Amino acid sequence: MSAARTARTVVAATLVAGLAATALAAPALAAPAPVKQDHAPTQKALQAAVDAGVPGAVAQARDGRHAWTGTAGERKGNDRYRVGSITKTFVATVLLQLQAEGRLDLDDPVEKWLPGVVRGNGHDGRKTTVRQLLNHTSGIYSVTSDPGFQEKVFGPGFLEHRYDRWTPEQLVAIAMTHAPDFAPGTDWNYSNTNYVLAGMVIEKVTGRPYGKAVENRIIKPLKLRATSVPGTDVTMPKPSSPAWSKLYADPNAQIHDVSRLSPTLAYAAGEMISDSGDLQTFYRALLKGRLLPKAELTEMTTTVPISPDLPGAGYGLGLMKQKLSCGEEIWGHGGGIHGSSSDAQVTRDGSHSLALNFNADWTGDSGPVLEAEFCGVTPQG
């Protein structure tokens, strides 16, 4: 361990120990209240999504000290929902905390923590680092791309298998039956298997379920009362609205209530539940440096290109940046899971945030809502 890493370890240990008392503390000097923003364009964007076929939409925004909540269709402002891949930011934060404490190094090979797990058809955990899992440069095949898994978990087979329990080892084993997408570190491709493995690494380092680390290090200190890692619990906590799906069939297919399912099908890649208020609290605290030391936050916000077609976008460690039409740069993550499409974004200084959810998985685009909130762009039509 380098001297710099040792210094970070001391700082991080203090930060984590004192987080519960200080994360939400008010500043010593009151800052002047910002001008209240007009959220009319954001409300119009939510309504436009419902008019286009989304059963219900909910969003909450904070700009300085002002909070606004909007709904359209069959939603309540305090609805809880499955956040899908937004889970990835929580997982990456825990791993960065563990690195700051000196308990692992993100440049460790995956093999060090999960010997023999990443093997087969060209996959090799000895040549793949934990960091490459977090920024999706590992090349590891995504389990959710496997045709058999898709049929059983996302297609019509879901109705029969919705309560099946999956182990993370089973999910990884499915991915290992395929060849890698590319050699580690040579390209970028989004893979849910990366975060299944990341959760397994947390469990190996801490000796406890990864969800306990998320709870003890993030949920409890930030007092996120609507946020949970459900594990094997198939139910949705109240208040919540039904989650609707066509099970990835044709647009005229029957709509099913898919609110109840086994979260084990997603595990650390996307199983968490939250609401729009908690998600904003989390991302604002994260970007303001309340969850990570400066060095680790810098690592998290160091991005790799996603696509030449998206020059303003980049993926860090469980965190994505994008540039909107007005030039505003926002950071956060989206998430999709059965009957649920979510997005949570915040400006780099943590002052302006938005979290939203559509309770459908076949329609709905968060882009116009983000443009409305952060750029004031009113939807046309």
Image (cartoon, rainbow, N blue to C red):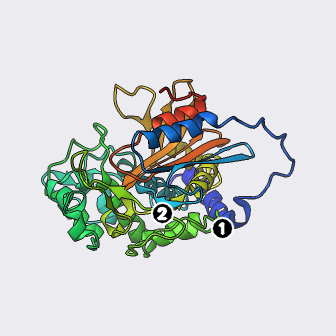
The quarter of the displayed image where residue 348 is located: top right
Labels 2 and 1: the sequence-earlier one = 1
Q: Is residue 15 left or right of residue 105?
A: right
Front in this rendered view, residue 130 or 309:
309
- Residue 105 is marked as none
Residue beneath disc 2: 273
Residue located at (39% from left, 65% from top): 259
Measuring 81% from the left and 51% from the top, which residue is drawn there? 27
**Place of residue 190 in the rendered image (x, y in percent of width and height, measured from the top left):** 32, 45
CB atoms at circles 2 and 1 under 8 Å apart?
A: no
Residue 112 location (% of width, % of height): 32, 62
Q: Position of residue 178 (x, y in %)?
A: 14, 52
Mark 2 or mark 1, whichever is nearer to me? 2
At label 2, counting other C-alpha atoms closer than 10 Å, the crowd grade (few under 14, some 14-19, many 20 or more) is many
Q: Marks 2 and 1, Cα distance to the nearest angstrom?
A: 25 Å
Q: Residue placed at 76% from the left, 58% from the top? A: 25
Q: Quick check: 94 above or below 376?
A: below
Q: Position of residue 111 (x, y in %)?
A: 29, 61
Q: Are there few (<14), some (14-19), or many (20+) residues within 10 Å of tag 1?
A: few
Q: Nearer the viewer, residue 259 or 294?
A: 259
Q: Amino acid at mark 2?
A: Ile
Q: Quadrant of residue 136?
A: top left
Label count reads: 2
- SS at badge 1: helix
Viewer-side residue, 370 vs 45: 45
- Amino acid type at image mark 1: Ala
Q: Can I make out residue 150 in this image?
A: yes
Q: Is residue 338 visible?
A: no
The circle drawn on residue 17 is 1
Q: Look at the numbered disc 2 and give the secondary structure of its residue.
A: strand
Left-right relation of 199 to 157:
right
